[in-house]
Image (cartoon, rainbow, N blue to C red):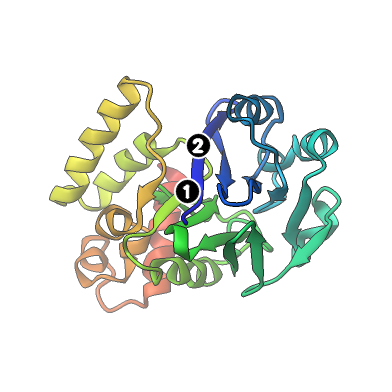
Amino acid sequence: MPLDIVTIPCLSDNYAYLAHDAATGATAVIDVPEAAPILNALAEREWRASHILITHHHDDHVAGVQTLAAVTGARVIGAAADAHRLPPLAERVREADLIRVGLAAGRVIDVSGHTMGHIAFHFAESGAVFTADSLMALGCGRLFEGTPDRMWESLSKLAALPPETLVYSGHEYTAANGRFALTIEPGNAALISRCEAVAKARAAGRPTVPSLLSEELATNPFLRARLPEVKAAIGMSGASDAAAFAEIRARKDRF
């Protein structure tokens, strides 16, 4: 049975998620920007947090971890490579490790680039991947620590997941990301349509995540850096995929 996943807005533009296994009652919380909205969401559903899954060390993803763990007794899980700057971990994980939330199994993917030690959690049977600030809706995270080559490698891992996978990313940045994406591919009909849908969703106060991976592959300029037409559009025909990605990321940084 797939996990029941709930999107929880936090802070000004962050998202946390609940992933609930109805068969056992186990509930994972993915990232904790602040504890209060998550505790409220758990109480509304009469769910108990059994796990806290941390993607990376940035404060806007971990500030509420210790409070939530103290209140719920949830088991805190994060990357071994990042353990020195994360809240105290009950379990340290690495690429390809499996995490069980009740009957559901999630695989750890190393998606370093935004930060080194950033991880994602892929629950294949639920068709869900929690990517935080690696792959984002119509975007990707700024490279605070990793190289473009490393980030491209990480994004390529995520791009290889089944296209029907839902991507649960960490922020409501989609509208701004869409405005930038249109500077790369102004004639991309799928992108134009998506930006219109995003504008309507935000005007109605609806979140724009999760997003389908197939939609990201069709519209996200960072995933599309491998395509000849995108390389041509940025004046880099014949360049490596990673070099084209680096140019697009540099343009976004200046946007």
Instruction: Say above or below: 122 vs 11.
Output: below
Q: Nearer the viewer, residue 171 or 39?
A: 39
- Label 2 sits on a secondary structure element that is strand
Q: Is residue 82 left or right of residue 206?
A: right
Which residue is the site of mark 2?
7
- Label 1 sits on a secondary structure element that is strand
Q: Nearer the viewer, residue 72 or 17?
A: 72
**Three-letter residue code for mark 2:** Thr
Instruction: Say above or below: 47 vs 214.
Output: above
**Three-letter residue code for mark 1:** Tyr
Which residue sits at x=47%, y=71%? 157
Q: Is residue 36 left or right of residue 7?
A: right
Which residue sits at x=74%, y=56%? 77
Instruction: Say above or below: 244 vs 32.
Output: below
Circle 1 crowding by C-alpha within 10 Å: few under 14, some 14–19, many from 20: many
Image quarter for residue 145?
bottom right
Cβ atoms under marks 1 and 2 closer than 8 Å: yes
Which residue is the site of mark 1?
168
Which residue sits at x=47%, y=56%? 1
Image quarter for residue 65?
top right
Q: Position of residue 175 (x, y in %)?
A: 35, 35
In front: mark 1 or mark 2? 2
The extreme top residue here reads 204
Q: Position of residue 170 (x, y in %)?
A: 53, 43
Which residue sits at x=51%, y=68%? 154
